[in-house]
Amino acid sequence: MRIAVFSSKPYDRDTLTAANAAHGHELQFFEAGLSVETCSLAEEAEAVCVFVNDKVDARLLRCMAGRGVKTVALRCAGFNNVDLPAAKELGLSVVRVPAYSPYAVAEHAVALMLTLNRKTHRAYNRVREGNFALNGLLGFDLHGKTAGIIGTGRIGAVLAKIMTGFGCTVLAADVYQNPACLALGVSYVERETLLKESDIISLHCPLTPETHHLINKESIALLKRGMMLINTGRGALVDTKAIITGLKSGQIGALGMDVYEQEEGVFFEDHSNEIIQDDSLERLLTFPNVLITSHQGYFTREALSAIAETTLNNLSQLERGEVCPNQL
Ligand code: NAI
């Protein structure tokens, strides 16, 4: 099958090319994201392969259907960027990679927590400049603290296990109780209770109309003063403006974010020689207690290999006319 791979970086090319040895597809790589303007690049391709920030809306889907594209293959788990009803109407299949490495994202959430808490990012710079003072680096023991996890699916469950290992009490809020978490001693509570009682809150639910801006002005008012918020889920799970107000007032004591509501066109790219126009992002970058990473939670060797393998396998299954369990 001819597959046009959009938003592809050198690491995507390497892993997809290696995995393709077992599938024999014809891969065309494009660094550009998929849009109405770029979809003409998918010359005679039966499938387009896209990533998290390619907005696959109805107009783009119509454009692709008109060019003979039959499948949209997402190289990610979340599918909030695709207009699924429009795809269905046009007869386009959409496949995704529901799981690749929950450890990658859960471990990154912990990296953000530990860095923000013990301020190793600041210590690293300080010591290199000959400043061995500890002022401003005071942290707290994770042991004995309460960690709240919103969304205890694959990633949330791995995080629950890690936090239990630190000696935290783990609270969870989910529409479904994960038996693996219950076995760890995780307590499922109402979201409001979790917001009020947690010292650290980590978001691991999908972005849906119900979870959009679940951290907003009202929910921030319920938080334990000085708590730590970690978002490796999706940017729009939090209302950025409300978060900035919460940070300024001290209600939010630390923020770690790997995703950002307006990350499209900014994250994954080098903008170091430009003036960044997003004032909210720039404001967030001024806080000493905010740590932002550029959607790298998934970025481990193991995860990239699994993404490549599952993506190509999804397309091979569709090509053979088989049922693809990862079809949406
Ligand atoms: P999953 O589908 O295994 O788990 C999601 C959990 O959220 C489920 O238990 C579900 O019941 C729960 N949920 C759904 N609606 C909810 C609500 N209203 N309130 C509370 N819980 C709710 O998904 P997985 O693999 O754990 O991934 C979670 C999210 O992490 C993805 O949707 C994606 O947005 C994000 N993600 C971020 C990555 C990164 O690189 N930063 C990489 C991979 C995923």
Image: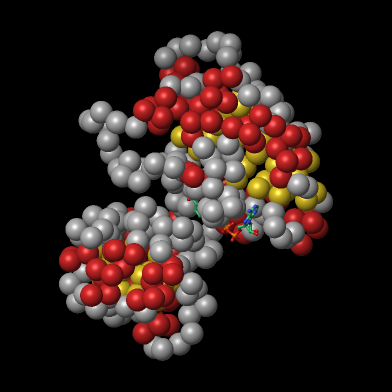
Task: Please determine whether, in this image, residue 157 is positioned above or below residue 232.
Answer: below
Can residue 164 be seen in the rendering of this structure? no
Q: Residue furthest bottom?
A: 321
| Quarter of the view holding residue 51 | bottom left
Q: Position of residue 133 (x, y in %)?
A: 55, 10
Question: Front-most of 82 and 275?
Answer: 82
Question: Front-most of 244 and 75?
Answer: 244
Residue 193 appears left or right of 257? right
Residue 194 appears left or right of 207? right
Q: Position of residue 252 (x, y in %)?
A: 61, 27
Residue positioned 41% across, 62% down in the render? 82
Task: Please determine whether, in this image, residue 56 is positioned above or below residue 132.
Answer: below
Can residue 93 be seen in the rendering of this structure? yes
Residue positioned 44% across, 46% down in the render? 296
How many numbered discs? 0
Q: Position of residue 59 (x, y in %)?
A: 29, 63
Question: Front-most of 318 and 137?
Answer: 318
| Quarter of the view holding residue 49 | bottom left
The N terminus sits in image quarter: bottom left
Q: Quarter of the picture for ligand 1?
A: bottom right
Residue 97 appears left or right of 59? right
Task: Please determine whether, in this image, residue 281 is positioned above or below residue 171.
Answer: above
Task: Please determine whether, in this image, residue 24 is positioned above or below residue 210.
Answer: below
Residue positioned 59% across, 32% down in the render? 217
Q: Position of residue 3 (x, y in %)?
A: 28, 72
How is the protein colored in the picture?
secondary structure
Residue positioned 48% across, 44% down in the render? 235
